[in-house]
Image (cartoon, grey):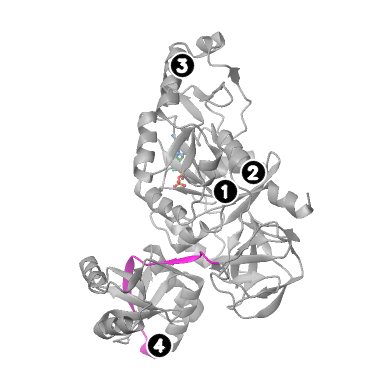
Amino acid sequence: MSKLQQEVAKRRTFAIISHPDAGKTTITEKVLLHGQKLQKAGTVKGKKSGQHAKSDWMEMEKERGISVTTSVMQFPYRQSLVNLLDTPGHEDFSEDTYRTLTAVDSCLMVIDAAKGVEDRTIKLMEVTRLRDTPILTFMNKLDRDIRDPLELLDEVEDVLKIMCAPITWPIGQGKNFKGVYHLYRDETIFYKTGQGHRIQELDVVKGLDNPELDKRVGVYAEELREQIELVKGASHEFDLELFLEGELTPVFFGTALGNFGVDHMLDGLVDWAPTPQGRETDQGEMIHSDDDRFSGFVFKIQANMDPKHRDRVAFMRIVSGRYHQGMKMKHARTGKDVRIADALTFVAGDREHVDEAWPGDIIGLHNHGTIQIGDTFTWGDSFKFTGIPNFAPELFRRIRLKDPLKQKQLLKGLVQLSEEGAVQVFRPLASNDLIVGAVGVLQFDVVVHRLRSEYKVDAMYENIQVATARWVYSDDAKKFEEFQRKNDHNLALDGGDNLAYIAPTMANLSLTTERFPDVSFRHTREV
Ligand code: GDP
């Protein structure tokens, strides 16, 4: 195996998807504890302590106790090197969350086992379906009174349309949570309370019929044997191929807070989740991760991560080849060769310089406004990776200046922020309005905040009657022209001059789509 193949084989790049409060932050802490990145779990982000509040923009996060930013964490686990891409996840979320999911090769879905499948999870799962990303599942909070485990699996199968293969099975719950039985290792692993902040010594009994089990958990032993019989009949067996196709998810039970079961999930990730996958180009070609020519794409741009460096950082997922400090790469959209002297990596929130990085890794490039979301960097060819979408915003506001003389700065600021993917701008063909569209409400505040601090313009929002936007296309030039003529009052250009239909109501949208069957109204647009 070449050095490149070895590095690829070692890597797993994943993200966590969940509904707010299901336990994503807590799992991240425990995962890093197992990855020996933290001396003590509980210091991932200053959610409560505010210790990573490094810039004024981040002040906002601190005030709200949430994380707007997406960071990247790399840690070793067993023989592997794991990249965990954190996604913002509170009441609010943004396109960054969605696009981060295009940069991973698998996802961990965390479910609060007392609640079951919640709506944010449904939405995020839809996004993972765009690429059939393999999903692992962690049923969390077993130290609380949870719902019936079999019912939980049924709900996941029904609502999320993915088959469930339990890998571990819980014994008891809440105050009586004893541990889990691992169906494939045929062993029971016991849970001990008060071990949340350290790696627990394994306490294991081999074999389901072992009388030792009866001694340890009493009546629960017989109950477990019956349940396992039932579970084996009623659920799916783990199947690697179906998992890799995104059709079946291995399910683990545990408690993140109690630091129990997270390691079983990590074992599954390392054993089964795919190594860094290739990506398709607009030439219809697949660039594989073991191709030794360098390539990568930008899925996120973030400003002002550190007040000492008032720059923007472009997050690039490496698709193929090796990055090394000082190398030259081609910025495909501009056609320019650039020398990258100082890429960054983000280890638990801190900047560290990297000399070398491999497929599946994320590096941060300093960006002075030339790099956009979706940009491809290559060894010299001029292709573009596909599959990094813009999502139709769901929230709209008209934006107005307090000082009307600053219209030019406002437009410049909005276009730049939309190139970054912070928000989307629409300029209606029939008026001089500027409409800001966002996927999450917090994006509006971020935009006003950044317009003020970076572009020196004071802006405010007004409500506007818009339900949704769709990018419109048609192969039939004549019909498209007719469509445009009849709907000019509802058409607008986005930040990249793409034509979009702005629907005042959902009823209007469905009527219009019916009336113009030759026009396609798309919910996503390739960047
Ligand atoms: P996030 O919003 O998904 O990042 O969720 P957090 O990790 O912040 O967890 C939300 C709340 O649930 C916090 O108060 C956690 O302490 C709590 N929590 C997380 N995991 C567990 C668990 O396994 N058991 C219990 N009882 N609480 C948990």
Which stretch did the figure color magenta? 386-406
Q: Residue at x 50, y 10 (%)?
A: 214
Q: Residue at x 63, y 53 (%)?
A: 276
Residue 122 in the image, given as x and y percentages of width and height:
38, 49
- List the residue tagged with mark 4: 407
- List the residue tagged with mark 2: 38
Of the two numbered discs 4 and 1 on the same chain, state the one appearing first in sequence.
Answer: 1
The answer to which quarter of the image holds residue 163 is top left
The Cα atoms of the two marked residues, 4 and 3, are separated by 71 Å
Do residues under tags 2 and 3 come within 8 Å of each other at their CB atoms?
A: no
Residue 171 in the image, given as x and y percentages of width and height:
46, 22
Q: Secondary structure at mark 3?
A: helix
- Judged by depth in the image, the label closer to the viewer, 3 or 1, is 3
Residue 456 in the image, given as x and y percentages of width and height:
47, 81
The Cα atoms of the two marked residues, 2 and 3, are separated by 38 Å
Q: How many marks?
A: 4
Amino acid at circle 4: Gln
Whereabouts is ligand 1, in terms of quadrant? top left
The Cα atoms of the two marked residues, 4 and 1, are separated by 41 Å
Residue 348 shows in this picture? no
Asked if the residue at label 4 sits under 8 Å from ligand 1, the reply is: no
- List the residue tagged with mark 1: 44
Amino acid at circle 3: Arg
Asked if the residue at label 3 sits under 8 Å from ligand 1, the reply is: no
